Amino acid sequence: MNMNRRQFFKVCSAGLSGSSIALMGFSPTRNICPYCSVSCGVLIYSTGDKSKNTPAEIIHIEGDPDNPVNRGTLCPKGAGLRDMVQSANRLKWPEVREAGSNEWKKISWQEAFDRIAKHMKADRDANFMAQNKDGQTVNRWTTTGFLASSAAQNEAGYLTVKTLRALGITGLDTQARI
Ligand code: SF4
């Protein structure tokens, strides 16, 4: 089917009104399954409107029937998305295991960013290769790799690759190996 971006969103809006739980008065949020590169569309239903007596909680996640990628279907992993989101074992903060320790300790996001930046700089300063043994410019940094997300939007993916390639990183991958 040929459809431009504007037409796609128009069709999506119209289709939403026919969705099962939407008929009961709930208004879902559109999102993308984070597991793999197929990027199936999902509808996320929640309670709570940020008022004090109605805590926000996801109550249902289903395939988006209007998304052209999956047309409402989800594989078993995607169908269990709500369990992953609400799992008691889900890690919601950065942790670090110091050298010589066998324990993980919780740290703040800021500390995590600072530590990662320091490690990256030290490694790049020590191992960046501007030229190969024949004197050809290569600008490679091969001792640090980066695992990006296959579930990010095109724009985020573009910026990720541009930034990492600008640093000279050659080892770039995602969980979907694409
Ligand atoms: S529902 Fe399954 S196939 Fe679709 S993006 Fe998620 S993991 Fe991939």
Image (cartoon, rainbow, N blue to C red):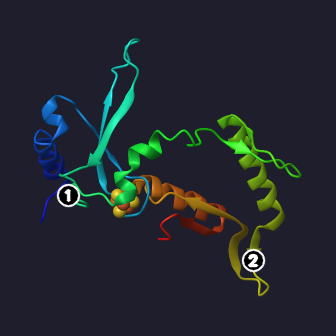
Residue placed under numbered mark 1 in the picture? 71
Q: Residues within 10 Å of mark 1 (few under 14, many from 20)?
A: some
**The N terminus appears in which quarter of the rendering?**
bottom left
* Mark 2 C-beta closer than 8 Å to ligand 1: no
Quick one: 129 or 149, which is closer to the camera?
A: 149
Q: Amino acid at mark 2?
A: Gln
Residue 122 falls left or right of residue 73:
right
Q: Is residue 109 visible?
A: yes
Q: Amino acid at mark 1?
A: Arg
The quadrant of the rendered image in which ligand 1 is seen is: bottom left
Could you say where residue 128 lies in the image, as x and y percent from the top left? 76, 67
Could you say where residue 126 lies in the image, as x and y percent from the top left? 84, 63
User: In this view, which residue lies farthest toward the right?
Assistant: 100
What numbered label is drawn on residue 103? none
* Mark 1 C-beta closer than 8 Å to ligand 1: no
Residue 64 falls left or right of residue 89:
left
Labels 1 and 2: the sequence-earlier one: 1
Residue placed under numbered mark 2 in the picture? 131
Disc 1 and disc 2: Cα gap in Å? Answer: 50 Å
Which element carries disc 1, helix, strand or loop? loop
Residue 145 falls left or right of residue 89:
right
Could you say where residue 137 lies in the image, as x and y percent from the top left? 70, 77
